């Protein structure tokens, strides 16, 4: 579809700079990629939205100017997250827009075009989201009765009419059938804190929140994020000292700059460990480790989901396999990796209730060992039963912990 419009070689996805991607199959075998495409998405002047076309989802033609605001348009910044739907013989774009004058809050608008790639023009009279609330990331939903709804996120910022919130809101509002305006009052679907996996947003050392979000980070008060904490923050949503993208600079101990969850040993939670048959005991064991490192080293013990840090899991499993020909059968749930007092510490918490830690002295001749800890109530894993004897210790947080270890002989 796009190949006839452009003579240049088609692009592959890794050559396209875009965030908030959305792909529409505008015709059988014909795809259009939309997304946030401005250079500075937080505070820079907005250009509009670009799109790309493809017939195989691998090779793309573009960019094509899907939307450029008219000269007297009210919005001039924060053009985010366009989604496009084919309805009533036309194409409707739902997009987040804002004004640098702050004359009205950021909101979700509706644009329309006769062709999938545009050009799109204003359809709604400004945002269809509530006038007193900053809103973003709208998605169209059509219910079984054919009614059209906008599902969206309420921003955390406050306005002159309404205070901000430290708890993310996911809402829905019914739209007129022609999509030009909202009808009725918004409905609160859920808050971020109601999701069992949601945690307060915590910024790594050296990172700065995006403009407008400073007072909702842990530095001045927690804000719950409606994003699953297993998701990596989008590029530039948090910036490191000097302006580098967090995703590129890799702040923190985890690959790609993953946002970790700080384990609270005063209010013990099973978040991230819910699938374990001994989740409460495993959470206590994790909290016990967190308390130890905080009290001894003033270090905050953080974890990320194991499937988001496969290099960390592989590092531990390689040592187990090489040193003792061990293969752990249980599923890894979470990992932690950090350095304290000349030691590189790596943890894996498993679904069975097993915790494995690698202590690796960085200096030549430093202490190097692998430790095993069993959560209260779990059986000794079959792969460890014949090779290790476990000593018992009592913990107020974890009950009875059984532990064992072996000394690392190789270099890793």
Image (cartoon, rainbow, N blue to C red):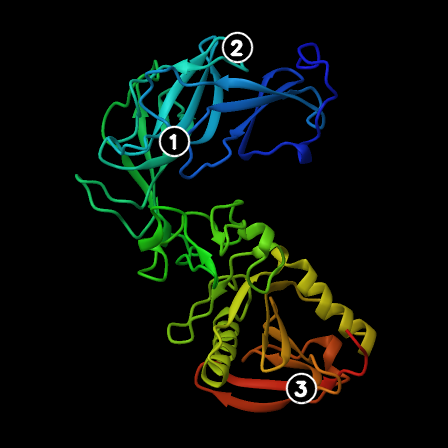
Q: For this rendering, which residue is in front, 323 or 46?
A: 46
**Residue 197 is at least partly visible in this image:** no
Q: Residue furthest left?
A: 161
> Label 2: which residue?
115
Comes first in the chain, label 3 or label 2: 2
Q: Position of residue 313 (x, y in %)?
A: 68, 64
Q: Determine crowd level at label 3: few under 14, some 14-19, many 20+ residues with C-alpha closer than 10 A.
A: some
Classify residue 356 as left or right of residue 236: right
Look at the numbered disc 2 and give the secondary structure of its residue.
Answer: loop
Q: Is residue 175 above or below residue 119?
A: below
Q: Is residue 127 left or right of residue 343?
A: left
Disc 1: which residue? 77
Instruction: Give the labeled residue for mark 3.
Output: 404
Gap between marks 1 and 3, in whole Å?
Answer: 58 Å
Q: Position of residue 360 (x, y in %)?
A: 69, 79
Specify whether residue 114 is in view: yes
Residue 352: give x, y in percent of width and height: 61, 69
- The quarter of the displayed image where residue 201 is located: bottom left
Q: Is residue 146 above or below residue 355?
A: above
Query: Is residue 155 shown above or below 344?
Result: above
Left or right: residue 209 compared with residue 233: left
Local secondary structure at mark 3: strand
Foreground label between 3 and 2: 2
Q: Quadrant of residue 309?
A: bottom right
- Residue count near mark 2 (Cα–Cα under 10 Å), binned few <14, some 14–19, many ≥20: some
């Amino acid at each position: 579809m796009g190949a006839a419009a452009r003579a240049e070689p088609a692009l592959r996805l890794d050559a396209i700079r875009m965030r908030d991607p959305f792909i529409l199959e505008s015709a059988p075998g014909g795809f259009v990629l939309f997304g946030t495409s401005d250079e500075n998405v937080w505070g820079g002047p907005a250009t509009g939205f670009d799109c790309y076309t493809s017939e195989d989802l691998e090779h793309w033609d573009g960019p094509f100017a899907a939307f450029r605001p008219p000269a007297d348009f009210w919005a001039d910044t924060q053009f985010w997250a366009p989604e496009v739907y084919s309805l009533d013989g036309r194409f409707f774009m739902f997009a987040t827009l804002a004004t640098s004058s702050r004359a009205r809050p950021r909101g979700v608008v509706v644009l329309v075009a006769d062709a999938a790639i545009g050009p799109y023009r204003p359809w709604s009279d400004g945002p269809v989201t509530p006038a007193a609330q900053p809103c973003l990331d709208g998605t169209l939903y059509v219910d079984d009765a054919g009614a059209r709804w906008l599902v969206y996120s309420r921003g955390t910022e406050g306005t002159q009419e309404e205070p901000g919130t430290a708890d993310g809101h996911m809402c829905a509002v019914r739209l007129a059938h022609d999509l030009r305006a909202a009808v009725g009052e918004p409905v609160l679907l859920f808050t971020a804190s109601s999701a069992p996996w949601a945690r307060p947003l915590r910024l790594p050392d050296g990172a700065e929140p995006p403009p407008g979000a400073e007072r909702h980070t842990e530095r001045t008060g927690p804000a719950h994020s409606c994003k699953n904490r297993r998701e990596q923050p989008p590029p530039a949503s948090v910036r490191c000292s000097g302006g580098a993208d967090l995703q590129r600079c890799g702040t923190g101990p985890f690959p790609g700059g993953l946002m970790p969850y700080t384990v609270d040993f005063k209010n013990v939670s099973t978040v991230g460990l819910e699938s374990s048959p001994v989740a409460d005991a495993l959470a206590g064991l994790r909290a016990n480790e967190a308390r130890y490192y905080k009290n001894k080293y003033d270090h905050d013990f953080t974890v990320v989901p194991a499937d988001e840090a496969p290099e960390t899991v592989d590092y531990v499993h390689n040592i187990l396999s090489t040193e003792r020909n061990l293969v752990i059968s249980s599923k890894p749930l979470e990992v932690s990796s950090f350095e304290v007092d000349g030691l590189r510490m790596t943890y894996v918490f498993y679904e069975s209730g097993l915790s494995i830690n690698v202590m690796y002295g960085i200096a030549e001749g430093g202490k190097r060992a692998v430790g095993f800890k069993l959560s209260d109530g779990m059986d000794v894993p079959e792969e460890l039963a014949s090779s290790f004897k476990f000593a018992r210790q009592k913990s107020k947080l974890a009950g009875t912990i059984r532990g064992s270890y072996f000394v690392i002989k190789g270099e890793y």
